[in-house]
Image (cartoon, rainbow, N blue to C red):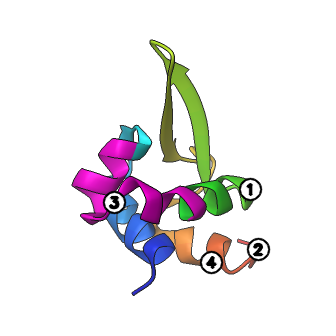
């Protein structure tokens, strides 16, 4: 399973999760920050994830406009 798919699986189980790159790496997928960096950027560009800031830290979360059960479709670029 690739990193993006692991992130999406986590968000399906915890649709309101929001965390830093370090938190995503450690708690969501159990990988290094370096391993998740490209996947996070790609998911943001595809509109699956959104970025916000809190206390000067970037936080990643599911795009609230996407149904958690349709995240794989968004990853593949399929319309709802």
2 horizontally vs 65: left or right: left
Q: What residue appears at the point 75 percent right and 76 percent down from the top-left corner? A: 77
For mark 2, give the secondary structure: loop
Q: Badge 3: how crowded within 10 Å, few (<14), some, or many (20+)?
A: some
Residue 11 placed where, x, y %? 38, 59
State how far apart marks 4 and 3 are (Cα). Answer: 26 Å
Residue 10 in the image: state x and y as whole percent: 33, 63
Callout 3: SS: loop
Look at the picture and state if 66 lies above or below 9. above
Is residue 75 on the magenta stretch? no
| Spot occupied by residue 52 in the image (x, y as percentages of width and height) | 57, 28
Which mark sits nearer the N-terminus, 2 or 1?
1
Front tag of 1 and 4:
1
Residue denoted by label 2: 79
Give, as a single range, the part of the protein colored magenta: 22-38
Q: Residue at x 45, y 82 (%)?
A: 2
Residue 26 badge: none
In the rendered view, does 7 fall on the left or right side of 67? left
Look at the image and say whether residue 23 sits in the magenta stretch: yes
**Residue named by callout 4:** 73
In contact (CB < 8 Å): disc 4 and disc 2: yes
- Residue most extreme to the bottom: 1
Of pointers 4 and 3, the one earlier in the residue sequence: 3
Q: Nearer the viewer, mark 1 or mark 3?
A: 3
- Badge 2 vs badge 1, beta-carbon distance below 8 Å: no
Image quarter in which the N terminus is found: bottom left
Q: Earlier in the sequence, mark 1 or mark 3?
A: 3
Instruction: Report the residue marked by disc 1.
Output: 45
Q: CA distance from mark 1 to mark 4?
A: 15 Å
- Work out whether residue 27 can be spotted: yes
């Amino acid at each position: 399973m690739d990193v993006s798919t692991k992130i999406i699986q986590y968000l399906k189980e915890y649709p309101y999760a929001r965390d830093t790159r370090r938190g995503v790496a450690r708690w969501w997928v159990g990988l290094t920050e370096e391993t998740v960096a490209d996947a996070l950027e790609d998911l943001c560009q595809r509109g699956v994830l959104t970025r916000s800031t809190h206390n000067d830290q970037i936080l990643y979360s599911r795009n609230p406009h996407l149904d958690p059960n349709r995240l794989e479709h968004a990853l593949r670029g399929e319309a709802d």
